[in-house]
Amino acid sequence: MSHSPENIVVVGGGVAGLATALRLAPLPVTLVVASPLGNDAATGWAQGGIAAALGADDRPDLHAIDTLSAGAGLSQPLVARRVAGAAPGAIDWLVGLGTPFDRNPNGSLALGLEAAHSRRRIVHAQGDGTGRVVLETLTRAARACPSIHVMEGWRAEELLADAQGRIAGLAARDREGRTVTLAARAVVLATGGLGGLYGATTNPLGAVGSGLALAARAGAVLRDMEFVQFHPTAMAVGADPMPLATEALRGEGAKLFNGRGERFMTEVPGQELAPRDVVARAIFAQIAAGESVVLDARMKDIERRFPGVVALCRANGLDPARAPIPVRPAAHYHMGGVRVDGSGRSSLAGLWACGEVASTGLHGANRLASNSLLEALAYAQWIATDIAGEECRVGPARAAGPPGPRSPARTEIRALMDRQVGVVRDADGLEAAAQRLGTLADRDGDALSLVALAITEAALRRCESRGGHFRADYPAPAAVARHSETRFGEAPGVAPSVEAIDTRQVA
Ligand SMILES: Cc1cc2nc3c(=O)[nH]c(=O)nc-3n(C[C@H](O)[C@H](O)[C@H](O)COP(=O)(O)OP(=O)(O)OC[C@H]3O[C@@H](n4cnc5c(N)ncnc54)[C@H](O)[C@@H]3O)c2cc1C
């Protein structure tokens, strides 16, 4: 089966894929989603909400300033201002689709506060159920949209290019395991993050950077791959993936203790509300010293304010109203990704990327909480406008890179990433990891080893600590902030080239 080359293929059924497909209407879109729509997308698990400068005391430029300071020198000011400026419109769009956001008694949107935001600006739904509510709304709208053709249980496996090298479609595996070719005038990757590469993660286990591998094999430039955000308080209750104890709990007064009952954050500036990477490293240091760590969230009203967290605890045999929650850091969000411009275009003609798989320049070295759903919503619109305005020109397609087999070394890779490419890194660990991952990538050529290798090589070459990337052997930031860009050659196992790029070279 092959679709008309007028077709646009969007890969992924989270906020990025659904919003892009809806914004493209009435242009025909084939939405390729590996899982049943509404499942296995990080979007559905978002607890905090969506950041937007809507309060009387707030302005988009204040939101942009907070974004830039979290980004530790690598967020691009123009991008931060543009995305913050688009946030109120993105919320309006979701309201127009029927999203039931939480409201104040006077009908205005209720705005929450999160760490590192200087104003109350977190729009949320059903308390900590924002992601689920947004995903349900978008899924309903996409199912009702006549121009969107949903292929559920289909996995994109390979990008196809025309004779000029323009991406002209993709090969996917359908539910019966058959390979299907879809011709397309444009392909939008919206495949989410890569936390599943780590043994300790809050992400769906299918989030292993498969879109990054597709793009990398086709020759696209990846940017800032080493920047992985570790959430400090994933619940250490033996579940894989780990349920999240949202940051908002600490915002409402929950405190961290070690196994000896000591509040080890009291000496750290900001204490429990210090930036995510600082809290994650403090917890990691306790665990490395043999301590356990708990989050004491026994507060009045926890059932009403955090029903999602309470339900996750109960499902794991814990009652957070009576006992502290065991926690540890876990891979949570990938700031790096497929390098895209202001229209979401990758370095390859015909290929766009949206959401967590993309590196837009918004998050820099560290993402500000609740900015990722927003980024996907903003870029979905810009991508749709860009594709709609493009002349339709597609020739016959051939494989743009070798297909990716499944990963036989999944368990080994997850353990290695935790141990050597995790919260605290150093040259010895990274070199050993790169060597092993290079061998695995040569042997298996799969998405997991390829993407893990890209993170590791970029982390090895970044001889400084900045945002989510911490090197024990280079604990300070370098004087000049630089992006990294990663490219793979023809052979998938060959070590990728990683280049440092001056931030001033970025438009
Ligand atoms: C526990 C948790 C809490 C969070 N809380 C917040 C928050 O409060 N606010 C915020 O802004 N962000 C939050 N985030 C981050 C945010 O949820 C994600 O960054 C965002 O949802 C990513 O959206 P996405 O559409 O890019 O990817 P996803 O929502 O992960 O969707 C990816 C989709 O791609 C599909 N897919 C992947 N590979 C393929 C393939 N090869 N072929 C076909 N389909 C494929 C998947 O099946 C899935 O449908 C949170 C993340 C987690 C894990």
Image (cartoon, rainbow, N blue to C red):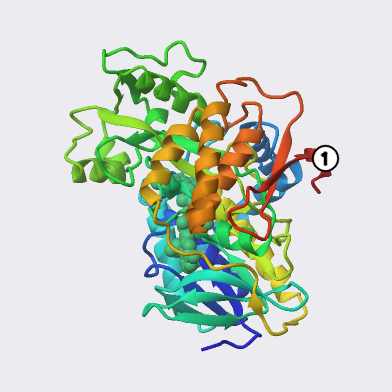
Q: Secondary structure at mark 1?
A: helix
Q: Position of residue 429 (x, y in %)?
A: 51, 30
User: Eyeballing the image, is 85 above or below 113?
Assistant: below
Residue at screen point 54% across, 68% down: 403
Residue 496 makes an appearance in the image: yes
User: Eyeballing the image, is 187 above or below 201?
Assistant: below
Residue 99 makes an appearance in the image: no
Q: Position of residue 469 (x, y in %)?
A: 57, 32
User: Eyeballing the image, is 53 above or below 68?
Assistant: below
Left or right, 242 with respect to 273, comes to: left
Residue at screen point 27% across, 14% down: 261
User: Eyeballing the image, is 386 above or below 342?
Assistant: below
Query: Neighbour class for label 1 at 10 Å: few (<14), some, many (≥20)?
Result: few
Q: Position of residue 296 (x, y in %)?
A: 28, 25
Left or right, 386 with respect to 252, comes to: right
Residue at screen point 65% across, 85% down: 5
Between 271 and 223, the one nearer to me in the picture: 223
Residue where numbered disc 1 is placed: 504
Res 378 → quadrant? bottom right
Between 56 and 329, the one nearer to me in the picture: 329
Between 62 and 333, the one nearer to me in the picture: 333
Between 89 and 181, the one nearer to me in the picture: 181
Res 346 → quadrant? bottom right
Q: What amino acid type is highlighted by mark number 1?
A: Arg
